[in-house]
Amino acid sequence: MRTASLCRLLLIGLQASLSTQLRHPHSSAARPDYPTRQIANVTVIDTPLVQDALAFARQHSDNTVWNHVMRSWLFGSLILQNNPELRAAVDPEVHAVAAILHDLGFDETPGSPVISLDRRFEVDGAIAARNFIRRHMAGKAWEERRVQLVWDAIALHTLPSIYSYKETEVMVMGQGINMDFTGPTNNVSQAQYNAVLHDFPADNFPASVTSKFVWLCHIKPATTYETSIQPWGENFVEGYSAVGHRFFDRLLGNGSAPLYV
């Protein structure tokens, strides 16, 4: 009887472990022992893929965007560092690569290979990040779901009303980026926040964001209609107008008369 009971208990434990790994395939129980290092008193993952993502982001970022990217990654890492349950549920390499590459769509270099004239900047960044992963020696071994999580996190990072309900990696990355605009949240202390700001200052950050948004409204206005960027076009770009391009206009006939009665 005792042997049978012990076997049943072992079987229950094995089933519970397998269930946890199926729900969170990169949780601490199944996750590789990734190398880490300290940046601004934050412990971060330090794999070759993350190192090369940093180099790629730096290549396509001006100083202000680079500092924002680093702050966003570190703030997200602090959210995880301060929350063991979240940390166990998140793939740290997915989070790192997504956060580091999330603003590739801001590259103003003439002829930049990561910029299109017909896609939202978030989508440009998501596509460039996906291409980077698929070209990378380590990234070629990634399962497609991990690549998709990076794509989704970048494509949705300006939409908290959506990313807040997505996979944990997507949600945490968005929250880390958002913290750069709101101040410390998610149990991140003011001291932790200030340490990141000290190493990666936010000097002229609002002016830089305005400059990027105005640039996008100039070069590809159609991608900014009905987005959070639209007000910058309306206030700073001569001749810019979303009227006639909005869903409201299409449904109601440019506001003059309904298309359907």
Image (tube, helix red, strand yellow):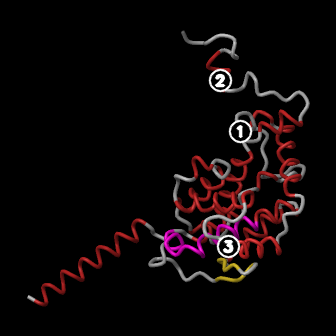
Classed neighbour count for the residue bearing mark 2: other residues with Cα under 10 Å, few (<14), some (14–19), many (≥20)? some
The answer to which quarter of the image holds residue 2 is bottom left
* Numbered label attached to residue 227: 1
What span is in magenta?
Answer: 70-89
Q: Main secondary structure of the magenta part?
A: helix
**Which residue is at the far bottom?**
2
Q: Quadrant of the N terminus?
A: bottom left
Residue 74 among those drawn in magenta: yes
* Disc nearer the start of the sequence (2/1): 1
In this rendering, the answer to whether 83 lies above or below 121 is below
In this rendering, the answer to whether 97 lies above or below 12 is above
Q: Name the residue type under label 3.
A: Ser
Residue at the spot 58% in from the left edge and 52% down from the top edge:
163
Residue 205 placed where, x, y %?
85, 57
Residue 178 placed where, x, y %?
69, 57
Q: Name the residue type under label 2.
A: Phe
Residue under label 3, please give it: 189
Q: Is residue 102 left or right of residue 95?
A: right
Front: mark 3 or 1:
3
Residue at the spot 60% in from the left edge and 53% down from the top edge:
152
* Disc nearer the start of the sequence (3/1): 3
- Distance between mark 3 and mark 1 Cα atoms: 31 Å
- Distance between mark 3 and mark 2 Cα atoms: 43 Å
Residue at the spot 87% in from the left edge and 37% down from the top edge:
218
SS label for mark 2: helix
Q: Name the residue type under label 1.
A: Thr
Residue under label 2, please give it: 248
SS label for mark 3: loop
* Numbered label attached to residue 60: none
Residue at the spot 76% in from the left edge and 23% down from the top edge:
243
Q: Nearer the viewer, residue 213 or 30?
A: 213
Residue 261 placed where, x, y %?
54, 9
